[in-house]
Amino acid sequence: FDEFIILSGDADFTPVLHRLRSHARRTVIYANDNTAAPYTAICDGEVRERDFLALLRQGHLQGKDAPEQVREQQALPSAAAIARAAS
């Protein structure tokens, strides 16, 4: 895999981020307001919890042509899709 998304704001994952980056892997973390600044500083990208939830509430992360039942069963979008929708 080229990109890893860590769904934790726990700075105990810092060694994991360092290891992945040493192998030229892109790292993205799912962070909230309690996530330590040094932890977010070493990742390549970050998905802020409040931004992600706002996008979900607004419906920006769902396929527009898909039936309602299918959209609810789809996997979460990639970090790149979230970043595109947020900008």
Image (cartoon, rainbow, N blue to C red):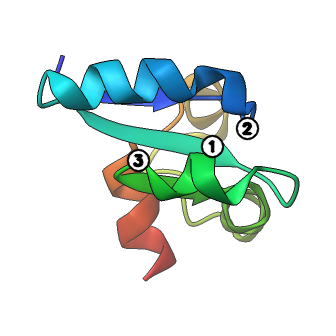
Q: Quadrant of the N terminus?
A: top left
Q: Dot 3 corresponds to which residue?
A: 79
Disc 3 from disc 2: Cα separation: 16 Å
| Residue at image point 43% right, 42% down | 28
Q: Dot 2 corresponds to which residue?
A: 9
68 shown above or below 83: above
Give whichever of 14, 76 is nearer the camera: 14
45 shown above or below 4: below
Q: Dot 1 corresponds to which residue?
A: 30
| Residue at image point 74% right, 51% down | 36
Question: Residue 79's spot in the image, x, y percent?
Answer: 40, 47
37 shown above or below 76: below
Helix, strand or loop status at disc 2: loop
Q: Amino acid type of disc 3?
A: Ala
- Is label 1 or label 3 in front? 1
Mark 1 Cα-neighbour bin, 10 Å: few <14, some 14–19, many ≥20: some
| Residue at image point 54% right, 29% down | 14
- Is residue 58 left or right of 6 when viewed as pictured? right
Question: Residue 60's spot in the image, x, y percent?
Answer: 56, 66
- Is label 1 or label 2 in front? 2
Give whichever of 30, 60 is nearer the camera: 30
Q: Amino acid type of disc 1?
A: Tyr
Q: Amino acid type of disc 2?
A: Gly
Asked if the residue at tag 2 contacts the one at tag 1, i.e. Cβ–Cβ closer than 8 Å, the answer is: yes
Disc 1 from disc 3: Cα separation: 9 Å
